[in-house]
């Protein structure tokens, strides 16, 4: 590998985090591991193989393309596409055995037609919008009607049976919580309200004799907030990759381990004198003689320009602050008195010590964002190096 910047993905930490979630939900609740957005920047194919080998039951993706990528890599575990299925993509979903969410009866009709053309069944999950206001069918009556249609069940009050959708079967009913990641110390009334609405819809369907399949709602935050939100299946994402959905200290006994670390090497050292400046715009001017290291990593690799002058990286176990503006392909750091040499490994992100150096959470806080965004921003040109794996290639 010629590239001097790389992301190390520790699959042993990934398995550990899955085991923490398994302990939280128990053996009867299925785990659908969210591997959307290239497994939050960790590499969807390798991570998916490891998670399935370690006991995850299913995989969740955001788009039909992400699901097809897994299938073409030979990953045949059950996959659900969380996002809206574009019109015309129905045959691709059916052909690759990817379950999809549905939000109206027109989607059911198109999926049924595709299933008949290909002679293969299509699993659907009815998504109910209980307050996220992003995707899903709105309103208790409309949701119950769509669940009936997906199940090919009889309508309420003795009305005539709905025409069955050949080839389509109701695998699950789901919703998504908008506020479950609020502090555990706060009363989360909105999640309780959403859950109550969702429970009422599921209960009404079951009262009509409908098999609702896998009922699911919980993201990482809801997994740890309450077992009442676990239902038949949970959909963890960020917790799998080692980050708590709540503030540190709020989840004692749930020690998640960051899976990804971003490294680079010093490619140049320069001794600058008082008054000399670093990088574009001369935003960093030496007030004393300084040693400046050039690092071959920049915003094209996923280290945002907004972190210029703010984030410490780790050099020889010590903090080195970014000097000047982060460039597309490089950034510079102050390494005065650290004894640094060209070729030294520098940790940009990773599991931080108590000093917070090289912490993706600290970096995210500096930007007013969340760890998810920085993980997903690590670009495809950064090689992923996998360690601690057990699932092969």
Image (tube, rainbow, N blue to C red):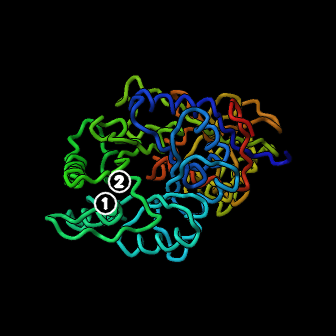
Q: Quadrant of residue 84?
A: bottom left
Q: Quadrant of residue 63?
A: bottom right
Q: Could you tell me which secondary element the residue under label 2 belongs to?
A: strand
Q: Is residue 10 visible?
A: yes
Q: Going 37% across and 38% down the picture, which residue do you hit? A: 223
Mark 2 crowd level (few <14, some 14–19, many ≥20, 10 Å Cα)? many
Farthest right residue?
A: 2
Q: How many marks?
A: 2
Observer-nearest of 192 and 181 = 192
- Work out whether 365 lies above or below 133: above
Observer-nearest of 110 and 392 = 110
Q: Are marks 2 and 1 in contact (CB under 8 Å)?
A: yes
Observer-nearest of 3 and 270 = 3
Residue 128 marker: 1
- Work out whether 151 lies above or below 162: above
In three-dimensional space, the C-alpha distance between marks 2 and 1, rounded to whole angstroms, equals 6 Å
123 lies left or right of 180? right
Farthest top residue?
A: 253
Where is the C terminus found, in terms of image quarters?
top right
Q: Going 31% across and 37% down the picture, which residue do you hit? A: 225
Q: Going 29% across and 36% down the picture, which residue do you hit? A: 226
Residue 74 is situated, as x and y percent measured from the top left of the image, at 69, 50
391 lies left or right of 32? right
Observer-nearest of 319 and 49 = 49
Where is the N terminus found, in terms of image quarters?
top right
Q: Is residue 374 visible?
A: no
Residue 147 is situated, as x and y percent measured from the top left of the image, at 30, 61
Reading the image, the residue beneath label 2 is: 174
Residue 360 is situated, as x and y percent measured from the top left of the image, at 54, 42
Q: Going 78% across and 35% down the picture, which residue do you hit? A: 344
Upstream in sequence: badge 2 or badge 1? 1
């Amino acid at each position: 590998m010629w590239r001097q910047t790389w992301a190390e993905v520790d699959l042993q930490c990934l398995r550990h985090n899955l085991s923490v979630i398994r302990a939280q939900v128990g053996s009867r609740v299925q785990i659908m591991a969210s591997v959307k957005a290239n497994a939050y920047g960790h590499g969807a194919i390798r991570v998916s193989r490891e998670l399935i080998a370690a006991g995850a039951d299913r995989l969740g993706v955001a788009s039909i393309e992400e699901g097809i990528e897994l299938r073409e890599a030979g990953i045949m575990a059950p996959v659900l596409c969380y996002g809206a299925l574009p019109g015309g993509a129905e045959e691709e979903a059916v052909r690759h055995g990817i379950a999809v969410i549905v939000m109206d009866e027109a989607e059911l009709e198109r999926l049924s037609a595709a299933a008949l053309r290909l002679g293969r069944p299509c699993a659907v999950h009815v998504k109910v919008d209980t307050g996220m206001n992003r995707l899903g069918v709105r309103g208790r009556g409309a949701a119950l009607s769509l669940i009936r249609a997906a199940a090919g069940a009889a309508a309420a009050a003795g009305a005539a049976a709905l025409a069955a959708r050949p080839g389509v079967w109701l695998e699950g009913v789901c919703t998504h919580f908008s506020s479950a990641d609020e502090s555990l110390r706060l009363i989360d009334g909105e999640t309780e309200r959403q859950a109550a609405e969702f429970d009422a819809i599921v209960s009404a369907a079951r009262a009509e004799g409908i098999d609702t399949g896998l009922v699911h709602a919980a993201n990482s935050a809801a997994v740890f907030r309450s077992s009442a939100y676990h239902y038949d299946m949970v959909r963890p994402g960020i917790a799998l990759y080692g980050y708590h959905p709540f503030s540190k200290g709020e989840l004692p006994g749930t020690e998640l381990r960051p899976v990804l670390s971003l490294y680079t090497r010093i490619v140049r050292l320069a001794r600058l004198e008082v008054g000399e400046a670093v990088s574009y715009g001369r935003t960093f001017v030496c007030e004393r003689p300084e040693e400046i290291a050039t690092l071959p990593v920049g915003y094209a690799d996923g280290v945002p320009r907004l972190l210029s002058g703010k984030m410490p990286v780790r050099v020889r176990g010590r903090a080195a602050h970014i000097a000047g503006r982060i460039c597309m392909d490089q950034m510079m750091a102050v390494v005065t008195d650290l004894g640094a040499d060209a070729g030294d490994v520098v940790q940009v992100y990773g599991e931080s010590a108590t000093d917070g150096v090289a912490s993706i959470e600290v970096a995210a806080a500096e930007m007013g964002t969340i760890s998810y965004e920085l993980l997903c921003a690590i670009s495809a040109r950064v090689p992923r190096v996998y360690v601690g794996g057990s699932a092969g290639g």
